Image (cartoon, rainbow, N blue to C red):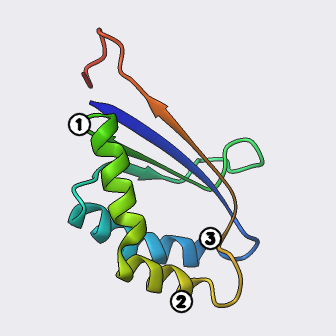
Amino acid sequence: MIYELHTYWAAPGKLDRLHTRFRSLAVPLFARHGIQLIGIWTPAHSDAETGDLVYLLAFPDQAAHESMWQAFADDPEWQAGEAASEVDGPLVVKATDMILTPTDYSPLT
């Protein structure tokens, strides 16, 4: 199992719209494409270092990660929903992601 940690920094004034897009579009599409959502968080003290929205996904392996993400990105519902949510400009000004592999003593192995 591998995990992928994402951090987003919302465009000014657009955090609520980002939450709406996740709640109504991204989360259901993750499930449709077999992407396991571990959790979504907002840092207790958001700033330039922590970001505004953090989420953790799980995949069986690297090949599954690549194929599931590609299917998600190619999904017409995602493409239309993303475009509609950004009609007034991007919701995210910065995004990072990191693949995490559990240690042999992690409870998430």
Q: Residue 73's x, y, as percent?
A: 42, 66
**In the figure, residue 100 lies in which quadrant?**
top left
Q: Which residue is denoted by mark 1 in the rendering?
A: 60
Toward the top, the furthest residue is 105
Q: Amino acid at mark 3?
A: Leu
**Label 2, label 1: how far apart the Cα atoms are:** 31 Å
Q: Amino acid at mark 1?
A: Pro
Q: Amino acid at mark 2?
A: Ala
Residue shown at the point (30%, 62%) measured from the top left = 30
**Label 3 with label 2: CB-CB less than 8 Å:** no
Q: Is residue 99 left or right of residue 58?
A: right
Question: Where the N terminus falls, by quadrant?
Answer: top left
User: Which is more toward the observer, 7 or 67?
Assistant: 67
The residue indicated by pointer 2 is 84
Q: Is residue 65 left or right of residue 91?
A: left
Question: Closer to the N terminus: mark 1 or mark 3?
Answer: 3
Choose the circle earlier in sequence order: 3 or 2: 3
Q: Nearer the viewer, residue 85 or 72?
A: 72
Spatial CA distance of label 3 from label 2 is: 16 Å
Comparing 52 with 87, the one in front is 87
**Please, what secondary structure does the residue beneath circle 2 have?**
helix
Residue occupied by mark 3: 15
Q: Disc 2 or 1, which lies upstream in sequence?
A: 1
Give the class, few, some or many, for how many residues have Cα within 10 Å of label 1's Cα (few <14, many ≥20).
Answer: few
Give percent across and percent down for residue 72. Answer: 36, 65
Comparing marks 3 and 2, which lies closer to the viewer?
A: 2
Q: Nearer the viewer, mark 1 or mark 3?
A: 1
**Residue at figure coordinates x 48%, y 41% from the top left:** 5
